[in-house]
Amino acid sequence: MVMLVSFFKDPEFANVDSSENESIPFRGTILRTKSGKFSSVSEPCVSCTTFNILAPIYKRLDQQNQNVRESDFRAFWLARNERIVDWLLYESSSIICLQEFWVGNEELVQMYEQRLGASGYDTFKLARTNNRGDGLLTAIHKEYFRVLNYRELLFNDFGDRVAQLLHVQSVIPFLQNNDDSMQQEILIVNTHLLFPHDSSLSIVRLHQVYKILQYLETYQRENKLSQVPVMLCGDWNGSKRGHVYKFLRSQGFVSSYDIAHEYTDSDHKWVSHRNHRGNICGVDFIWLRNPNKSIKPLKISWAEAAFGIIKYQLQKAQLNEKDAFDFLRADNNGNYITYSDFCDALKQEMKDLWVQADVDGNGVLDYDEFLRIWYCTCSEHIDEDSNSEDSNEGITKEAFGFAVKNAILFPREVEKGIWPENYHLSDHARLTALFSPVRLRCSQKSL
């Protein structure tokens, strides 16, 4: 009973009408200016919120007894999630992407669907595979967008991770134009990548991003959507220092929060998560890619990122390039690495990566081919079927995209790299970004 009383006294469970509202980043089309004051937004804007809401089956209530979880106490998880919905509805973002949504509890699912539905949202939920209990929820406000298509991506790999893809169209055109062919549509992805329980899983997480981008590329090509902006939202379980961040940057994506605050790739000033080990880090992102972005072919970018991880792991073991080559070829008497040796060393079969490493296709890696991995260089010839420019490359066309107006993390202390001890709504901060539509000139290309 003592625990329950202190739980409800927590300031995070105060009314939405409390003084905490000073920290609300956006409500509808309200923008916080650089000075911290609110101002009305006269131009049409789109807001997007991503939030890992910490599934009750994972929320630990007693650090001395890790088996005591919030899911065992209905009053606890219901009050906390009601509070989360209060905040979401007060902000009223056009797009809401939630991770660690407790899909295994029917009462909680109905509460979210009913309250969000009553406030004008279409909701889409997706459970992780193998009955993990949690999953994703994406909500699209019907006043802003109509959902044209919804797809589910099951990675079917370690960690049972999944992703959602929504193809939406603006209800009222953001930009009035004379070109009826200009698509005012968006592709939205919501995902929660694998937690790096050890560094060997970094390449698995990177491969999950590769699968998402492959799926996006295929969907855009099949539906002739090369001229639409893409938003990737979620918990990426990796910071700006990681290979996933660098991979997405190479694919033309920008972090909305970092753009809004004019941070460079090397700035590490904010955090968004305190994990079960007590470490704080910035792992939650709303990525934006406009259709005018020039990007490196996907397979090349993926190979360079993956080979970079391999080199990093080998260097961590204090191996130079020759020692690393000897390590990967294992007990092989020849001066080459076989496919089975390669997979054994990486603890998984990754055929795409092998094909790109085995340049001459003879089924083994010689030392020269291995040096390509070591120095993370890939040739254009490995990407013959990728998204290279076609004969329309020189033709320009007007397209629709977004400019980042602002982005805010809550609680606000995390923006300074501090995790507040009195914050218990989740072990993640909530990230909300505001975008304004813009006209872009880009090459008329086919994916």
Image (tube, rainbow, N blue to C red):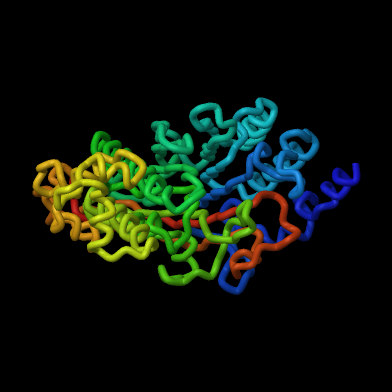
The quarter of the image holding the N terminus is top right
Count of marks overlaid on the render: 0
Quarter where residue 150 is shown: top left
- In the image, is 98 to the left or to the right of 154? right
Q: Is residue 96 left or right of residue 162?
A: right
Image quadrant containing the C terminus: top left
Residue 320, position as x, y percentages in the image: 28, 65
Question: Which residue is at the far right?
Answer: 1
Query: Looking at the picture, how far across and down is residue 436, in whole percent?
Result: 44, 57
370 vs 60: above or below: below
92 versus 248 height, above or below? above
Q: Work out whether residue 439 can be spotted.
A: no
The residue nearer to you, when weighing 115 against 193, is: 193
Name the residue located 44 percent from the left edge and 62 percent from the top edge: 240
- Residue 299 in view (yes/no): yes
At 27% across and 61% down in the image, what residue appears? 323
Q: Position of residue 97 (x, y in %)?
A: 53, 43
